[in-house]
Image: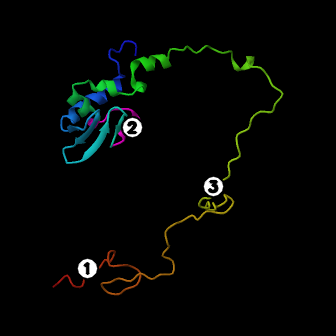
Amino acid sequence: MQRHNGPICLKIQNHLKKMKVDAARRIPRWNGNEQFEVVGPYGEQYKLDLQAWICGCRKWDLSGILCAHVVAAPNFLGQEPEKYVHQYYKVETYLKIYNNMFSPINGKEMWPRTEYAKVLPPYVKKRVERPKQNKRNESEAPIQCTKLGRQGTKITCNNYGNVGHNRKSCKVKDRFSYM
């Protein structure tokens, strides 16, 4: 971040470039002081107050990152929109946050011992859920075959009605083959 040139963090700067392109489609109407009414390409209108840092779409209010409405208003006044980016996203603030160095600590063996009991995790009540299905024990004999057998059924031939074979395995030619 120290090598980054510019007052705003890189990700926010890239977002700001996109908003500058989008702001070209917006028309700001000045209402005095630093208040504007910004009209979008589809006729939507948003109230904007640069002094109080409030935009009608609320994106700027909630995140501190400029929306297209806010970028359009400073362009109208001849100002730089970077002026209205929140302090959180400035490189200077970022460097201040990470300026402090963390000092190393000794290993777990060197930590001081206390007479208090170990802290246990909190009791979590089991949530209500679908009951688990009962699984078969291995002691029960599994079913060997999944297909139904042909025991006790009589196979008849569709050609002649003879018992013991079917039409597919009939050795006599089809009785209707002469037609």
CA gap between label 3 and label 2 equals 39 Å
Residue 20 marker: none
Q: Amino acid at mark 2?
A: Asp
CA gap between label 2 and label 1 equals 90 Å
Question: Under tag 3, what secondary structure?
Answer: loop
Residue drawn 26% across the image and 24% down it = 80
Mark 1 Cα within 10 Å, few/some/many (few <14, many 20+)? few
Q: Mark 1 or mark 3: which is in front? A: 3
Quarter of the image for the C terminus: give it: bottom left
Callout 2–callout 1 Cβ contact below 8 Å: no
Q: Mark 3 or mark 2: which is in front? A: 2
Q: Amino acid at mark 3?
A: Arg
Q: Position of residue 58 (x, y in %)?
A: 36, 41
Q: Is residue 51 left or right of residue 142?
A: left
Residue 173 marker: 1
Q: Is residue 59 magenta?
A: yes
Q: Quadrant of residue 13?
A: top left
Vertical placement of residue 158 versus 56, above or below = below
Q: Which residue is mark 3?
A: 127
Callout 3–callout 2 Cβ contact below 8 Å: no
Q: Position of residue 8 (x, y in %)?
A: 35, 22
In the rendered structure, which segment of residues is drawn in magenta?
57-69
Quarter of the image for the N terminus: give it: top left
Give whichever of discs 1 and 3 has the lower sequence position: 3
Vertical placement of residue 21 versus 93, above or below = below
Give whichever of discs 2 and 1 has the lower sequence position: 2
Residue drawn 24% across the image and 47% down it = 44
Q: Which residue is mark 2?
A: 61
